[in-house]
Image (cartoon, rainbow, N blue to C red):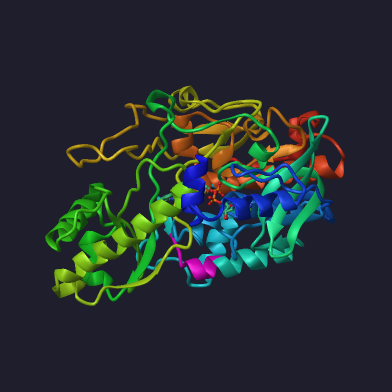
C-alpha cells in the first residue's frame, strides 16, 4: 500500500506521520509503514501425542476416532466450536455416496438412525439426511469414547519441520500460540492448511480456467413448512429427475427474486425442518479471508432475499422462517496437496482399482459452474466425463514433500475433475478413517506410513464388498 493511502486508511493523513513512525520504531524492530516485524518468542510445547489430526470435519473426525481406537494417543484440533465441519458448521445435512461405505460412516449413520435423527421421509440408499445437532453430539461422544483429546476454537497457523519431517504444529487460540508435538500428523482441514504451512506443494482450481475455483454456497435451515404441502419442491425419493429444483426456482422467481444458483434445492430433514441451498458465490478464493468474508456477507443477504421471495407467494410458503444460516459458508474446494499419487480423471474414466486401495468412490463428476453465465443459466463443467466406480490409493494420502504427514478428505492429492467426485462426505469419511488407522500404526511403530507394508494396515474392511 502507498504511504499516502496507508495514512488515509488509518485516518491519520496530515497529522499522523510522526506519531505512526514513533510508535513503530519505539519497539526497536525493523517495522515500517508497509509491514511490521513480529518479535521472536518461545512457544511452549503444550502436548505430545502419537497422532495429531488437524480439522474435525467428516474426514478429520473419522481419522481421530480410528487412530484413538487403534491405540494411539490422539489429539483433534478444530477451528470451530463443534465437530463435523460441513455437516454441522456448514449445515450440509445430506451425505452422498454413503450407503456402500462400510467403515465408520456406517456406524455413524446407524447410530443417527437409532436416535431418530435420520430424515424419516427419505430412507433410500442414495443419500442420508440428518439433524445437524444430533450429529454434533454423536461425534463428540464417539471421539471422547475413543480417548481422543479434543481442542475447539483452535486454529493451525504454523509448523516446525526438521530435515523434511513435520515435528510440531503451532496453533493460535484464546490461549495464545501453542506448539503440539506428534509422531504423525493428519491434515483434514479441507483446505490443506497444515500441509501448506509445512511447505508442501499443492494445486488449486481448474487448470483449464486460470485456476478458477467452484463457487461457495451458504446453506441454512428453514421451518414453517409442511412436507406434505411442499414435497413437489423438495429433493427426496419421489423427486424423479430432480424436477423439484426447477419448480423451486420458479417459486423464488415468482416471489420476486433471481437466485444466483439456478438449481436451488430444498432438502427435508423432518416433516417441518428443511435445509436449503440456493446461492452460488462466484470468483472468491477459500484461501483469502477477505474473499470468504465478502462472499459470506453477499450470501447471507441473498439467503434472506430468497426466503422472503418464497414467503411473498403466500399459500404453502406463507409461514416459512429461517432457523439458522450456517456459521461457515460452504467451501467446495481449496488446496489439493501433492501426494505420492495423484487421483486423476483417467482413474474415474477407467474405474482404476489400486493394490493399495483404501476406499471406493461411486459418486460421479460434479463440478459446479465456476462463473455466473451471461444468460444466467447453470453451465455443466463436467467436461462430458462419465466415471465408473474407482478407488483411492493410500499413496494419494501420503504427502510428497514433507514426511510424517497424511492427508484426509477433500485436500488429498487429486486433479480438478477427480476432486469434484471424491470430495463428497461419504468417501471423505472413509478416506479419513484409513488415514487414522495408518497414522496410528506408523506412529506407534515409529515409522513413516510408506515404510510399512500395505497389507499390515488391514484396511479391507473399509472397501466396498
Ligand atoms: C455447498 C456445498 C454443498 C455440498 N454438497 C454435498 C452433499 O450434498 N453431500 C455430500 O456428501 N457432500 C457435499 N459437499 C462436499 C463436502 O462437503 C466436502 O467436500 C467435505 O466437507 C469434505 O470433508 P472434509 O472433512 O475434507 O472437509 P470439511 O468439512 O471442510 O472440514 C474441515 C474442518 O477443518 C476445520 N479447519 C479448517 N481449517 C482449519 C485450521 N487451520 N485449523 C483447525 N481447523 C481447521 C474446519 O473448521 C472444518 O471443521 C458439499 C460441499 C459444499 C461446500
Rendered image quadrant of residue 166? top right
Of 345 and 2, the residue lying toward us = 2
Residue occupying the point 52% across, 55% down: 15
User: Does 321 appear above or below 456?
Assistant: below
- Left or right: residue 358 compared with residue 291: right
Residue occupying the point 39% across, 68% down: 120
Of 439 and 216, the residue lying toward us = 216
Rendered image quadrant of residue 275? bottom left
Look at the image and tell me in which quarter the C terminus lies: top right
Q: Position of residue 405 (x, y in %)?
A: 72, 38
- Left or right: residue 12 compared with residue 305: right
Residue occupying the point 76% across, 30% down: 450
Q: Which residues are magenta?
A: 129-135
Q: Position of residue 37 (x, y in %)?
A: 70, 44
- Left or right: residue 400 compared with residue 117: right
Q: Position of residue 174 (x, y in %)?
A: 69, 65
Of 403 and 366, the residue lying toward us = 403
Q: Position of residue 452 (x, y in %)?
A: 80, 32
Residue 134 lies within the magenta run? yes
Amino acid at each position: 500500500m502507498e504511504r499516502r493511502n496507508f495514512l488515509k486508511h488509518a485516518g491519520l493523513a496530515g497529522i499522523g506521520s510522526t506519531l505512526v513512525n514513533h510508535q513503530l520504531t519505539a519497539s526497536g524492530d525493523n517495522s515500517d509503514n508497509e509491514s511490521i516485524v513480529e518479535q521472536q518468542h518461545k512457544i511452549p510445547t503444550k502436548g505430545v501425542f502419537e497422532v495429531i489430526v488437524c480439522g474435525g470435519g467428516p474426514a478429520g473426525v473419522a481419522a481421530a476416532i480410528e487412530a484413538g481406537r487403534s491405540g494411539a494417543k490422539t489429539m483433534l484440533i478444530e477451528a470451530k466450536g463443534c465437530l463435523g465441519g460441513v455437516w454441522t458448521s456448514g449445515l450440509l445435512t445430506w451425505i452422498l455416496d454413503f450407503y456402500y461405505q462400510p467403515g465408520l460412516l456406517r456406524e455413524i449413520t446407524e447410530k443417527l438412525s437409532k436416535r431418530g435423527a435420520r430424515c424419516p421421509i427419505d430412507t433410500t440408499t442414495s443419500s442420508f439426511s440428518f439433524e445437524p445437532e444430533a450429529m454434533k453430539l454423536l461425534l463428540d461422544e464417539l471421539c471422547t469414547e475413543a480417548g481422543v483429546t479434543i481442542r475447539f476454537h483452535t486454529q493451525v497457523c504454523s509448523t516446525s519441520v526438521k530435515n523434511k519431517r513435520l515435528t510440531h504444529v503451532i496453533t493460535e487460540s484464546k490461549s495464545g500460540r501453542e506448539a503440539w508435538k506428534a509422531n504423525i500428523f493428519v491434515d483434514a482441514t479441507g483446505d490443506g492448511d497444515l500441509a501448506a504451512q509445512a511447505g508442501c506443494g499443492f494445486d488449486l482450481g481448474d487448470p483449464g480456467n486460470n485456476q478458477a475455483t467452484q463457487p461457495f454456497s451458504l446453506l441454512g435451515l428453514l421451518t414453517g413448512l409442511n412436507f406434505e404441502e411442499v414435497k413437489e419442491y423438495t429433493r427426496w425419493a419421489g423427486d424423479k429427475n430432480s424436477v423439484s429444483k426447477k419448480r423451486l426456482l420458479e417459486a423464488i422467481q415468482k416471489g420476486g427474486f433471481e437466485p444466483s444458483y439456478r438449481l436451488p434445492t430444498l432438502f427435508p430433514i423432518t416433516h417441518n425442518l428443511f435445509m436449503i441451498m440456493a446461492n452460488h458465490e462466484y470468483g472468491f478464493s477459500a484461501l483469502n479471508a477477505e474473499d470468504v468474508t465478502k462472499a459470506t456477507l453477499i450470501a447471507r443477504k441473498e439467503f434472506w432475499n430468497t426466503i422472503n421471495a418464497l414467503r411473498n407467494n403466500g399459500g404453502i410458503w406463507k409461514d416459512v422462517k429461517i432457523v439458522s444460516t450456517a456459521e461457515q459458508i460452504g467451501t467446495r474446494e481449496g488446496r489439493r496437496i501433492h501426494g505420492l499419487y495423484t487421483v486423476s480423471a483417467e482413474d474415474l474414466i477407467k474405474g482404476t482399482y489400486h493394490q493399495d486401495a483404501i476406499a471406493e468412490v461411486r459418486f460421479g463428476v460434479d463440478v459446479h459452474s465456476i462463473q455466473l453465465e451471461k444468460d444466467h443459466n447453470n453451465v455443466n463443467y463436467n467436461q462430458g466425463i462419465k466415471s465408473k466406480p474407482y478407488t483411492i490409493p493410500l499413496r494419494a494420502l501420503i504427502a510428497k514433500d514433507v514426511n510424517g504427514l497424511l492427508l484426509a478428505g477433500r485436500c488429498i492429492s487429486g486433479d480438478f475433475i477427480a476432486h469434484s467426485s471424491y470430495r463428497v462426505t461419504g468417501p471423505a469419511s472413509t478416506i479419513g478413517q484409513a488415514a487414522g488407522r495408518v497414522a496410528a500404526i506408523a506412529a506407534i511403530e515409529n515409522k513413516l506410513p510408506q515404510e510399512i507394508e500395505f497389507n499390515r494396515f488391514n484396511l479391507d474392511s473399509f472397501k466396498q464388498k
